[in-house]
Amino acid sequence: AWEAIETGTGNTVYSGTVDLTTTQSGSTYSLTDGARGNHRTYNLNRGTSGTGTLFSGPDDVWGNGSPSNLESAGADAHYGAALTWDYYKNVHGRSGIRGDGVGAYSRVHYGNNYVNAFWSDSCFCMTYGDGSGNANPLTSIDVAAHEMTHGLTSNTAKLVYSGESGGLNEATSDIFGATVEFFAKNSSDVGDYLIGEEIDINGDGTPLRYMDKPSKDGASKDAWYSGIGSIDVHYSSGPANHFFYLLSEGSGTKTINGVSYDSPTSDGLPVTGIGRDKAEKIWFRALTTKFTSTTNYAGARTGTLAATGELYGTDSAEYKAVQDAWAGVNVGA
Ligand code: ASN
Ligand code: ZN
Ligand code: CA
């Protein structure tokens, strides 16, 4: 049958009503993004293996905003993948996770009451559970971008998922989870330096992680210490998340898009932020051209400084800010 790239309507759980790029094949539409490497979105319908079924139907409207409509989370996942694709393409000039223009795929409604989401290198795909009570699918933009970024890291620095490199791997996913959310810029998606604030994983409306002061989650670390490599990678990510916040926004208190932040430094010295637009370019360049599988915190410092020197010069305010932000999380010269 003939095929055409279409613009459908997604009634998402977390992002309101959004445009989705879909494919029409004869009289059937599907969540196949012909503008982004044919990234597809599948319904596992509580299964835990295979691909389930490609979201498809007779019209180009997906979901009704409620998680009880199985298309709604599919719309979120399709949207989050498209935004993440556009972010890497438009901001960093990278076409797809591997840089080869080929899309991945998403699977939603994994298992029953499954409170997680994950990227898998073996399927080159990301997967989302429906959360507790199957009522809070883990399909918000920051989570989608977090998971998709694990694919990027696997195809670039290949940071080993344990020890300090594991913390840097996790932080990379949180950093770009946040920057993609800022990139989204629609009325339902105001960017923030919180991770997972929409999926209510804690059941009390608190986010999963805080980049301004990671210890607010009760487990993540604000600053590096010898031995941080032995804690869970979702907590050893703290110093790098905190570094990124400090570099972008500076230390102290600040309100952005209605969210209040309070970011202290471990050395007590102030950091002057250089803005997110520069900070994200530094981290991306370091990830894709400096970091290796065994990069630790000290290596992340030298890698980001090398990237900053190339982008802005070693005498620049940006270079000084990178030095200060690392010092602010106890990663020194
Ligand atoms: N959602 C988790 C993550 O992306 C899954 C995991 O622990 N691998 O980090
Ligand atoms: Zn992760
Ligand atoms: Ca967020």
Image (cartoon, rainbow, N blue to C red):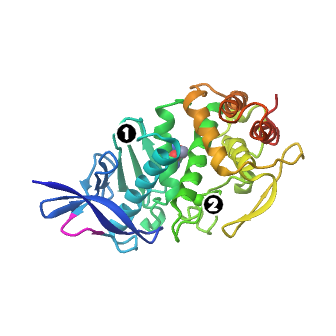
Query: Looking at the image, in which quadrant does ligand 3 appear?
Result: bottom right
Range covered by the magenta-colored residues: 57-61
For the residues labelled 2 and 1, say whether their Cβ atoms are less than 8 Å apart: no
Q: Position of residue 45 (x, y in %)?
A: 30, 59
The residue to which callout 2 is attached is 192
SS for callout 1: loop
Q: Earlier along the polypeptide chain: callout 2 or callout 1?
A: 1
**Residue 44: % across, % down:** 31, 55
Quarter assignment of residue 304: top right
Query: x, y percentage for residue 193?
Result: 65, 57
Left or right: residue 332 compared with residue 184? right
- Point out the residue furthest to the left here: 1
In the figure, 219 relative to 194: above or below?
Answer: above
Question: Quick one: 286 or 168, which is closer to the camera?
Answer: 286
Q: What residue is rendered at 13% in x and 64% in y?
A: 27
Does 169 sit above or below residue 200?
above
Tag 1: amino acid: Phe
Mark 2 and ligand 3: say if the CB distance to the nearest ligand atom is below 8 Å. Answer: yes
Q: Which mark is drawn over residue 124?
A: 1
Q: Does 166 appear in magenta?
A: no
Dot 2: what SS? loop
For the point 82% across and 42% down, the residue is 328
What's the residue at 73%, 44% (across, down)? 243
Q: CA distance from mark 2 to mark 1?
A: 28 Å
Q: Nearer the viewer, residue 128 or 11?
A: 11
Q: Nearer the viewer, residue 76 or 232?
A: 76
